[in-house]
Amino acid sequence: MILLPIILPFLAAIALGVLGKPRQGAIANAALSFVVFLLTLAAFTSPGSGLIHADALGLLFGALTGFIAFTTSLANIGYVRGAESRLTPPLWRLYHALCQVVLGATLLGLYADNIGLLWASVEIATIAATLAVSLPRTASALEAAWKYFILGGVGIALALFGTMLVYLAAQPALGPGLAAMSFSALSSHAAWMDGSLLTLAFVFILFGYGTKAALVPLHGWLPDAYAEGPAPLTTALSSPMLNLALIAILRFRHLMQANVASGGTAMPPGPFLIVLGLASLLLVGFSLSRRRDARRFFGFSSIEHSGIAIFAFGIGGPAAIFGGLLHMLLQTLIKSALFIALIRAAALRGSTAPGNYSFSHLRGLIHSNKYTAWLLGGAIFALTGLPPSGLFASEFIIISQTVQRNPWVSAPLALGLLLCAAAILRNIGPLIFGPAPPHTKPVKASPEMHLVALHLALVVVLAFAMPGPILHLLSSVSGALQ
Amino acid sequence: MNFTFSLAHLMGGLILLCAFSLLSQRRLAAMITLYQLQALTLSAAAVWQGFAQHEINLYLTGIITLALKGLLLPIALRQIVIRFNLTRAVESTMPMALSMMLGVGLIGIAVLVVLPSTMSAVSLTREDLAIALSVVLLGLLVMTARRSALAQIIGFLSTENGLVLAAIGMPGMPFVAEFSVALLVLLAFLVVGIFLLRIREHFDTLDITGIEDIERRGR
C-alpha cells in the first residue's frame, strides 16, 4: 500500500513522457497528482515494512508533499495554457514526466527507512530538478542548470560518503548487513555506535544534504534555479524537496544526539546546526533587500526558512524541534501559494517567461486585478512571520526555546528575522499598491487564485487551531526525534 | 591475509596517485588518460575486495566499473575533446604549485581526521577510508582549480571513484553495486548533458565566468 504513491508517479512519468499534447499532459498530471495525494493519505493506515517503512514524520510530510503536488499541478494547467508556445511538445512531455519523477522521488525519500534509499531518492530528485531547470534551453537556464548540477553533484557525493561512514559507525552496534542502514534500527542502537566516526559522518551528511537544503555557504544554486526554470516545477514544487533534505539532516542529528545523551563519544550536533542556520539567516537578511527579481527574491527567502528550521533543530529539545517542523510545514504551504500567485501575477502582465518577474515590472498589481493582488500581498506578508501569519506561531516557539536553552544566540536570530521581515515588508507596498506601469488594464482573476486562498487559510488554521490528530502526531514525532 | 592487505593498499595508493597527478596536468587528454588509469585500478581493487570478502556484489561492481568507467566514459570524453577541439591546455584558477601543495595538505587532513576517529574499525577499512577520503577531497580540489567544464567533470569523476573505493572497503556493506550504478547515472547525465546542451561556448571561456553573467544582469 505504501509502495503505491511511490511507484505510481514513476510509472506515470513514463506515460507522460511519451504521450499526449501539452494541455492533455497538464490535465493528466493534475489527475495523477490528485490520486497520489489520496494515496499519501491512505498511507497513514498502512505504513509498510522493511526498506519502505514510513514513520509519523514521513507520513505527515508525505501527505503535505502530495497536497502541494496536487495544488501545484492544478495551477500548472493554467500555466501551460499560457506558455504552450515557449517549449516544443516533446519538451512539455518531458516537463510533465519530471513533475511526476520529482514527486515520486520526494515521497520515496520521506517514506524510506534506509539511509541508502534516502540518498538515492535525493539523487533522483536532484537529477530531475536539474533537467527541469535546463528545459527553457536559454543560455541563462543552461548556466543555472549547470551550476545546480555541479553543486548538487558535489553535495550528493558528500552525502554518500557520510552515509557510508554512518554505516561504518554502526558496525560495533549492528554488524554488517541491512540493519546498519535502517533508521529505526540505528536510532534504537545509537548509544552503541562509534561516536567519533558518527561525528565525522555527520559533517559530510550536513554539507551533503545541506547543499540540497540550500544552507549557506552551499546555497548558490537555488536562486538561479528558481529564476530560470519552468516556474511551477522549479519553484512551487521545490519546497517539498528542501523539506526532504532538512528531514534527512534532522534524522541524522537525532542519531548523534542520542549517542551524546547516552554517554557516547559523538560531539553534540547543536553548534554545527546553529552556525549554519544563523549564517543562512543573516546572509539572506543582509542581501534580500538588493534583489530585484521576485523569483530570486523569494528563492533567497527559501534559504532563510531552511536556515530557521536548521537553527531550531540545532537548539534541540522537543519544543524547538516541534517549532522547526511546524515552520517547515507552514512555510511550504505559504511558499507554494506565493509562487502560484506570482505566476498568475506575471501572467496578468503579459508573460510568465523568466525575466518577467522583476518587482518594477509587476508593481501596482491592484490596478490589474484586486483579488490576485490581495492574495499575493497576503502570501508575501505571511512570509514575514508577523501575526496573523502562521509563521508567527512557529517563530514564537523557536525564539522562546532559544531564549530558554541558549540565550546567547537569540540576539543574532532576532536580528536576522527582523532584517528579513523588513526587506519583505518594504516590497509589499510598491508591488501591490504602487503606481502601475502605463497602459495597465484591469484583468479578470483566474480560478487558480482560489488555491492560494485555500493554502493561506490552511496555514492560519494549522498554526492557531491545529486539529488534534495532527498536533498529536507532530508532538510525538518531535518528542521521539529530540 | 597479509597479501590481501598489501595488494589492496597498493591499488588504493595507485588510485590516490592518479588523483594527485590530475592536479599537475594541464591537458584534457592527459587528464582523461589518468582518469582511465584510476578507473581501471579501481575495478581491479573492487574485484580483489570481492575475492577477499567473498562478495559477489563486489565482483559485479568491478565489472561495471571496468566496462563503463574504464572504457566507455573515457571514450566519450575523448570524443568531446575531439569534437569541440579542446586539445590545448586548460586554464587554471591557481598556480600549479599552490594547487599541489593544497593537495598534499588535503591528504594530510584526510589521514589526520580518519585514522584517529576509526580506532575501533578493522585496520584495512581504516586505511582504505583515509585513502578514499583523500581521493574525494583531491577531486573536489581539481574541480575548483580548473576553469574548463570538462576538467571539472573529470575532477568530479575522480571524486566519485574515491566514493566507490570507500564503498568497496566497507565490511559487508549492502547496495555497493547499486550505489556505483546510481553514481554512474549521475555521471552519464553530466557527460550526455555536455553533448546535448551544447554548452560549447562555455568550454572556451569557461563556465564560471559564464555563470557570473547572471549576476551582472542583476538579480
Image (cartoon, coloured by chain):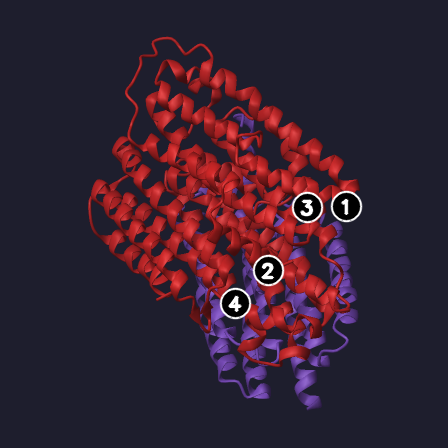
Chain colours: A red, B purple
Residue A406 is tagged as 1
SS under mark 4: helix
Q: Is residue A126 left or right of residue A343?
A: right
* Residue highlighted by disc 4: A116
Residue found 38% across the figure and 36% down from its top: A454
CA separation in Å, label 4 and label 3: 25 Å
**Are dots 1 and 4 on a single chain?**
yes
* Residue highlighted by disc 3: A276
The spot of residue B214 in percent (x, y) is 52, 31
Near mark 4 (Cα within 10 A), the count class, few <14, some 14-19 or many ≥20, is many
Residue sitting farthest toward the bottom = B1
Residue found 61% across the figure and 68% down from its top: A187
SS under mark 1: loop
Q: Which of marks 1 and 4 is in front?
A: 1
Residue type marked 1: Asn
Q: Nearer the viewer, residue A279 or B74?
A: A279
Near mark 3 (Cα within 10 A), the count class, few <14, some 14-19 or many ≥20, is many
